[in-house]
Image (cartoon, coloured by chain):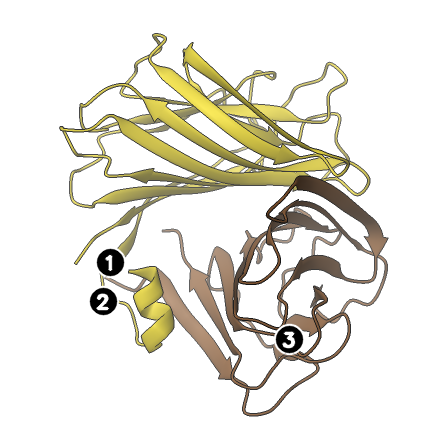
Amino acid sequence: MLLGILASSTLAIEGDYESIATVTVGAGGAGTIDFTSIATTWNNLQIRAMARTDRNDGAVQDIVTLTFNGDTASNYSDHYLFGDGAAAYSDGTANRASIRNYYVTTAQSTSNRFGALIIDIVDYKNTNKNKTTRTFSGADQNGSGNVSFTSGSWRNTNAITSIQLKPLGGSNFVQYSHFALYGIKSA
Amino acid sequence: MSLTYNPISSTTLTSAQSSVTFSSISGAYTDLVLVVNGSQTVATNTNMRLNGDTGNNYSDTTITGSGSAASSSRNSSQPYFWFGVMGTGQCVASFHIMNYSNSTTHKTVLHRMANSVNYSQASTGLWRSTNAVTSITLLPNSGNFSSGSIFTLFGIKAE
């Protein structure tokens, strides 16, 4: 659908790419970001986010975890490729309790700096397939930082009806963190 | 229902050009996405400036696949972003400027470059300004963008 827009330069049909829900974290912070009661209207989902956590142990980066339908059992796996400005790294982990997305900023980062994430969840309502995610993310911090690609898997054929994002190192996402969920339809 | 993913403006070069600027960008959206399908007259980095800021307020971290190796590099305190090499062959690039209109956070750009000849690259960039983004300028580090290159700016609006 996106390539069609680019090639033809015509306007998208109303409803092809829809804003479903948006969360902007307030002054008190948020321990989790929850998108619930997700309808089966669309084919794919996309989360676009800017995030910073309250991790305060000296680290300038934190991981955003992703779980579906309240499942916190070891039904997830992920692989990542990231660059830290000096070298490229890759790793993967099977059978863990969430999909990990690398990296956002923390309380140790210079103020006003947030990491960015674009998370695609393809075919989220298909009951014949396990679910796959694709994340493009990163946070440059002027002298440090990372850019990352992550692929994730949830070994479950249920349609996704809820999504939870949570910091791994910190307790909360801090004020001004922003998470937007979009639905994308096929023709 | 209003459109969520809106084409704002598009430019197709009818001759080689040293820069492309989108200006007077409305604050009506949440994110901006700039998509380029084109090439350069000289294979070089694609630089980006926001709001015409020529101060050393830009930095970026890049990962590159050359076909034989993966590597990463960084630029700090620069007068523009040093993004990927479009090259002289056909290239597709996207630049996601996240939460561009807020006046609280520094601005982050996520960038991907698919160069048909040399590289696959991705970057994250930081513009150390809390100002809303109202203009975007792309310029090759040397040479020009080639005639026929297409630059399209989209706005994504969260409800």
Amino acid residing under circle 3: Gln
Residue B39, by quadrant, is bottom right
Image quadrant holding the N terminus of chain A, namely bottom left
- In this rendering, the answer to whether A68 lies above or below B44 is above
Mark 2 lies on a secondary structure that is loop
Mark 3 belongs to which subunit? B
Q: How far, Cα to Cα, is label 1 from label 3?
A: 33 Å
Check the residue under mark 2 and report the chain it is in: A
- Residue B122: percent from the left, percent from the top? 60, 49
Palette colour of chain B: brown
Residue on which the image places disc 2: A13
> Height in image: A21 above or below B157?
above
Q: Mark 3 points at which residue?
A: B40
**1 and 3 marks in contact (CB < 8 Å):** no
Amino acid type, callout 2: Ile
* Residue at mark 3 shares a chain with residue at mark 2: no
Question: Residue B73, image x and y in percent?
Answer: 75, 44
**Other-residue count near label 3 (Cα within 10 Å), few / some / many at <14 / 14–19 / ≥20:** many
* Residue drawn at point x = 54 percent, y = 92 percent: B14
Q: Which disc, if any, is residue B15?
A: none
Rendered yellow, the chain in question is A
Residue marked by disc 1: A16
Q: Is mark 1 on a helix, strand or loop?
A: loop
Look at label 1 and name its amino acid.
Asp
Closer to us: A10 or B127: A10
Asked whether A95 or A13 is in front, the reply is: A95
Please state the total of marks drawn on the protein image: 3
The reply to the same-chain question for discs 2 and 1 is yes
Question: Which residue is farthest bottom?
Answer: B14
